Structure formats: C-alpha cells, structure tokens
C-alpha cells in the first residue's frame, strides 16, 4: 500500500476555522501523493485588531500541524500580512522558520515571489475588498518593488465574502480579473482572497490576455513545492505552477 502514502504534507494555518475553497482548489492542482493539513484561527474582520487578537493562538495551531508531519507551512490569508505590515510579517516568518526548522511562507509573500519569478513588476489587482484595503495591499506590494497599475474590486465585508455563493464568486473572479488588466500595461494580475473559487478564472484570463494570473492558492502551492525541492511543472492551472521547473531569475 506504499503507493497511497503521501510523499509530502503541506500545512496551512488558515484565518478561519471552516475552510472549503482552499482544500477544494488544492486537490484540483496538487500532484498525486500530496496532502494538505490545515488548522484554523478565528479572525473576525479585516482589521489589525482582529488579527492581533488571534496571534497568541498561532503557535498552538503550528504545533498541531507539526505533529501531523507537515513540511512547508503557509500562514494563509493576505489580510493577515496586510494588517501586520511587510517588515513584521517577514520577521515573523523568519522567526517561525528558525524555531520550527522548516520553511514558512504566507500568501502575500508567495504572490510577491511568484511575480518576481515571472518577471512581473506591474500588476493589476482584482479583489472583493474595499478601497482602503486595496490601498494597503498596494503599499505592501510597493515595498517589494511591485507596482499596482490597475485595480478592480467589489468592496465586500468579511461576512459578505463568507456568504457569497460559488456561482457569483466564480463570475466575479472572471469579471474583476478582466477589469484588472486595464489598458494592457499590467504584466500580470493578482487575485488575492482565499474564500472564493478563482482557478477557473486563472485559466480563462490567461488564455484571453496571454499574461499570468496569480491567486492565493496557486502561489501558496507553488512556493511550498519549491521549498520542498519539487520541480515538476503542474499544467492547466496557470503560468506560475507550470513554471515550477524553471530556474529562479
């Protein structure tokens, strides 16, 4: 029965105790034998106060995942990084990696690394967040040398995003992603936010515009597989995953 034994577990600390879009899209993308394990925080809003309230529970969630044998570990949720700021987020990732002796990443930093890997420095941003959050994310990206040149958003709250039905979410991903390409000056479009189904939009938009589209889930998987020295390209879910075999720029 060794053929059904996982060859790698990737751990995710999620912002919420209930997750469904992440495992669904993970297993659409993942090669055979790859397993995910998740442990959830209970972040109630897109605010720094809400994130800070849950940080004391982070070590306990990580410990749970380590005991399940995970390798690379992702602190999921771009709003967490936005709330903490890039310097603090990167410092936290480095501290966790040193303490637990394994690679740590977060969706925001994985997206940044993916953009740089694909040599994309000017991006369109497609989100379901309000203007203030998008400006915060643009500032976070700017610290990494990434310029947001177009933005398309639907301005929903965390509660509204959690209750959005799949059909509407899929349609929004395609519509907002298309708007985010703007006048064509963007090198790529990023579509952060883990509580909507975006994989279909990745494929449709890349075929339409001929440029990369990166989401939380594609970036987190790409980063984790690279950290585990897995270089087998994954086709069908966007240029970033299909570039796994490429050398870093």
Image (cartoon, rainbow, N blue to C red):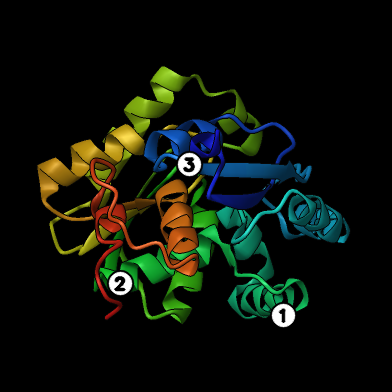
Q: Is residue 149 visible?
A: yes
Q: Secondary structure at mark 2?
A: helix
Q: Is residue 150 visible?
A: no
Q: Quadrant of the N terminus?
A: top right
Q: Cα distance, mark 2 to mark 3?
A: 26 Å
Q: Cα distance, mark 3 to mark 1?
A: 27 Å
Q: Nearer the viewer, residue 54 or 2?
A: 2
x, y percentage for residue 53? Answer: 85, 55
Q: Cα distance, mark 1 to mark 2?
A: 24 Å
- The mark nearer the N terminus, 2 or 3, is 3
Left or right, 187 with reference to 6: left
Q: Mark 2 or 3, which is nearer the eye? A: 3
Q: Residues within 10 Å of mark 3 (few under 14, many from 20)?
A: few
Q: Label 1, on which residue? A: 98
- The mark nearer the N terminus, 3 or 1, is 3
x, y percentage for residue 81? Answer: 61, 64
């Amino acid at each position: 029965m060794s053929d059904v034994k996982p060859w790698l577990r990737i751990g995710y600390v999620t912002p919420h105790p209930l997750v469904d879009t992440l495992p669904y899209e993970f297993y659409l993308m993942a090669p055979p034998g790859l397993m995910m394990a998740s442990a959830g925080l209970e972040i109630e809003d897109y605010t720094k106060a809400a994130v800070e309230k849950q940080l004391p529970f982070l070590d306990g969630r990580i410990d749970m995942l380590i005991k399940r044998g995970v390798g690379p570990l992702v602190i999921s949720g771009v709003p967490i990084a936005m709330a903490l700021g890039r310097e603090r987020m990167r410092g936290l990732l480095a501290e966790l990696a040193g303490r637990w002796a394994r690679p740590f990443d977060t969706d925001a930093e994985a997206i940044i690394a993916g953009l740089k890997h694909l040599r994309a420095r000017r991006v369109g941003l497609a989100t379901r967040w309000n203007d203030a959050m998008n400006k915060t994310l643009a500032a976070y990206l700017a610290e990494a040398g990434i310029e947001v040149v177009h933005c398309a958003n639907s301005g929903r709250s965390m509660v509204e995003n959690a209750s959005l039905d799949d059909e509407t979410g899929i349609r929004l991903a395609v519509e907002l992603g298309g708007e985010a390409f703007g006048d064509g000056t963007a090198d790529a479009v990023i579509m952060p936010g883990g509580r909507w189904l975006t994989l279909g939009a990745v494929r449709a938009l890349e075929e339409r515009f001929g440029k990369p589209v990166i989401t939380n889930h594609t970036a987190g998987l790409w980063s984790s597989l690279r950290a585990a020295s897995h270089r087998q390209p994954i086709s069908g879910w966007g240029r970033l995953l299909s570039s796994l075999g490429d050398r870093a720029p």
